Amino acid sequence: MTLVRLLFYVMSFIAIASALYAALSKNLVRSIFIFFVTLFALAGLYVIALADFVAVTQVVIYVGGILVLILFAFMLSGKETLNVIQQQKGKFINMAKVPAVILAVLFLAVIVNIILKADADNLPWVKQAIAQNNEITPANSTIENIGVNLMTTYLLPFEAISVLLLMTLVGAAHLSRKEGSA
Amino acid sequence: MITLTDFLLVGALLFCTGIYMIVSKRNSIQVLIGIELMLNAAILNLVAFGKYDKLNNGGQVFALFAIVLAAATTAVALAIILNVYRRYKTIDPDEIKNLRD
């Protein structure tokens, strides 16, 4: 077992375990802070998949931006959010959650079945990419190539997403203004 | 060597955890965390397949786009949550039954 494989198992264990804890925890604050750990572990998985630029972006935007926003929402919405959690205490198995568990487990069974049947490692285009030496290896740096591609091949989606970001900026500012002040 | 199937299995587990959170939680912020988990599972799949595209970098570029989209979604969703809290004094999705009259 190589070191990379060991790191992959450690990272994926941390990611899945912390995601499960965030899902099962009844404490909202714990659930938010353990989500930090999930995001960092996922950034580690991206590094193992040889996408270092995506990993850095994940840390900057998700951990620096989205989680701070979620913390803001939690703090601004006050103690009412904690009252919901107080009501759920005491019951070990909550009957209302059984359908959710069944749905998630059945969906997992379907997805795992499809993944094992699809046999992604032997797909024709993946084999072709390996044969044509089109596979990213740990030796080469991808960041320069991403920058060039972003400004040439993917220029249209890039512009579209910039317009979308402007729209969300205006929309969020409009939604969160004080009522009646127009 | 880590195979594609390993990454896909991790992604599937994260996706199902996200589904469980969305369906079962009685708190809008935790539902939002579930949505973020599902998005991250999708991004993991994009990155894993993007390894086999050195020339065009399709997987990694679209993973970046997906991260930006997630940020935009979260900003709007949090503005909506704050508005709902101001109107109903709760953010439990089950309690919100009325439209604006």
Image: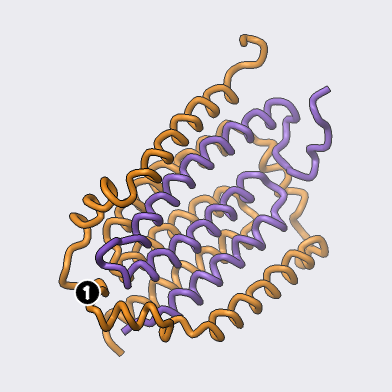
Question: Mark 1 belongs to which subunit?
Answer: A
Can residue A67 be seen from the camera position used here? no
Could you say which is closer to the camera, residue A84 or residue A35?
A35
Residue density around tag 1, few if under 14, some if 14–19, many if 20 or more, within 10 Å: some
Residue B98 picture quarter = top right
Q: Residue at horizontal 57%, vertical 39%?
A: A74
On screen, residue A88 versus residue A77, left or right, reads right
Residue A43 sits above or below residue A163 on the image: below
Where residue A179 appears, x then y in whole percent? 66, 16
Could you say which is closer to the camera, residue A10 or residue A62?
A62
Query: Mark 1 belongs to which amino acid?
Result: Thr
Where does the C terminus of chain A fall, quadrant-wise?
top right
Residue B61 picture quarter = bottom left
- Among all residues in the image, which is located at the extreme top? A181
Q: Residue at horizontal 43%, vertical 74%?
A: B7
Residue B19 picture quarter = bottom right
Where residue A129 appears, x then y in whole percent? 30, 77
Can residue B38 be seen from the camera position used here? yes
On screen, residue A70 versus residue B20, left or right, reads left
Residue A63 sits above or below residue B76 on the image: below
Q: Which chain is orange?
A: A
Q: Which residue is mark 1?
A: A137
Where does the N terminus of chain A fall, quadrant-wise?
bottom left
Q: Residue at horizontal 41%, vertical 49%?
A: B65
Q: Which chain is purple?
A: B
Secondary element under disc 1, as helix, strand or loop, is loop
Q: Residue at horizontal 27%, vertical 86%?
A: A2
Residue B62 sits above or below residue A92 on the image: above
Could you say which is closer to the camera, residue A86 or residue A17?
A17
